[in-house]
Image (cartoon, grey):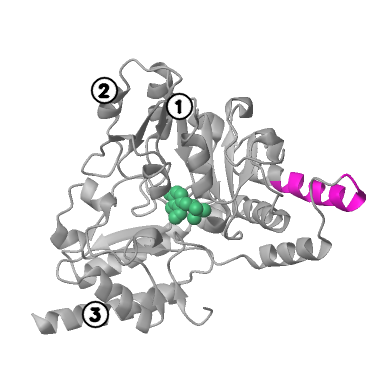
Amino acid sequence: MTSRSYLDFNATAPTRPEVIDAVAEAMREGGNASSVHADGRAARARVEKARQHVADLVGAEAAGVIFTGSGTEANNQALRSDKIERIIVSVIEHESVLQARADAVICPVTPEGLVDLDALSQLLGESDASTMVSIMLANNETGIIQPVAEAARLSHDAGALFHCDAVQAAGKIPVDMKALGVDSLALSAHKIGGPQGVGALICSDPSTMPRFVHGGGQESGLRAGTENVPGIVGYGVAAESALAGLEYFGALAALRDDLEERVLAIEPTAQIFGKELDRLPNTSKFATKGLTSDVQVMGLDLDGASISAGSACSAGRVETPYVLAAMGVPDELGLCAVRISLGWTTTAKDIDGFIAGWQKLHDRKLARN
Ligand code: PLP
């Protein structure tokens, strides 16, 4: 992957070198974090250190962190509680929220891609704690940052609970769970350079969260199964690095903006989604009529750049990505959308390489017409 330009950080981030070292060391050390002997206690100490780092990343209490097997599992644990009778989710949520319950009530977004708060108010009506609202902090496809604090306030005022999928936001922008005022937050390690297959559900009051995976008493009885100590240790290191690197990550917006300006210079009709809104600094989603997503993804792949048409979960589908469809983007544009997502390995050279490859595809399109 080193000689290629990896521009698909929102699908997964390359594992940070310090994470690889920490995971390898934890694997060498071994130990079951539930064992009472010295080896077990050492593993427990490593898990608790990681718990603190993950809590720090989002301004939460370590006691509220439940380690899970993925961001998907964290969303499912929050939303599939027996105590919740009704859930309201935005139409642009990740599949792990949209598919968590078949009876979810869907809240629309505005044509700009922001959750429609008036519609949310209407859907909430008079609710109580058996209703849960779930809205993501940053959209995985467009990077658009959602009005979560306001949505959480509206939900609480109506008596409902509020869950937030912060999988794409944490580690890319500052996230403060208390300032957002949410009841729970889902996170994932691999989006910030941690190992794949590790996530966290952060609860403001874990005593209200029912267990999801049944069995032993791990994770305060809320997530059974021997803890993935190496994975959790790697997550802790990734969270620590991501928090320390937030400013650097924010500066990626300059590279992203440069990429967009150069795309627009080549093709002034290119449409950039969410350009005027608060977006993740690393994400660009744009479309050019007549240059289909698959032609761009495959053409750039052959040229040595990894980009995507949309979320990795929906790769291979021949339809407008549902996030863009929900914004009212017509198929002629939606089928031509690509997502470029940068990260700490990205340099100006990667952007130059992308633009050179994209210019070739664009020239070929002009030659065809
Ligand atoms: N939520 C969002 C917004 C995501 O982008 C993803 C992954 O793409 C997930 C949840 C799922 O996380 P995981 O891959 O850890 O299951």
| Circle 1 residue | 84
Q: In the figure, is residue 364 to the left or right of 78?
A: left
Residue at the disc numbered 3: 361
From mark 1 to mark 3, how far is it between C-alphas? 49 Å
Residue depicted at x 47% and y 35%:
80
Specify which label sits upstream in the sequence, 2 or 1. Answer: 1
User: What secondary structure is marked by label 2?
Assistant: helix
Label 2, label 1: how far apart the Cα atoms are? 19 Å
Residue 256 visible: yes
Classify residue 268 as left or right of residue 5: left
Residue at (24%, 80%) from the top-left corner?
Answer: 361
Residue that badge 2 annotates: 122
| Residue 39 on the magenta span | yes
Q: Quadrant of residue 157?
A: top left
Instruction: Note whether residue 170 is visible.
Output: no
User: Mark 3: few, some, or many residues within 10 Å (few <14, many ≥20)?
Assistant: some
Q: Classify 267 as above or below 107.
A: below
Give x and y (percent) for residue 337. 25, 63
Magenta stretch, main secondary structure class: helix
Is 133 above or below relative to 356?
Answer: above
Q: Magenta residues?
A: 36-50
Separation (CA) of disc 2 from disc 3: 46 Å
The secondary element bearing badge 3 is classed as helix
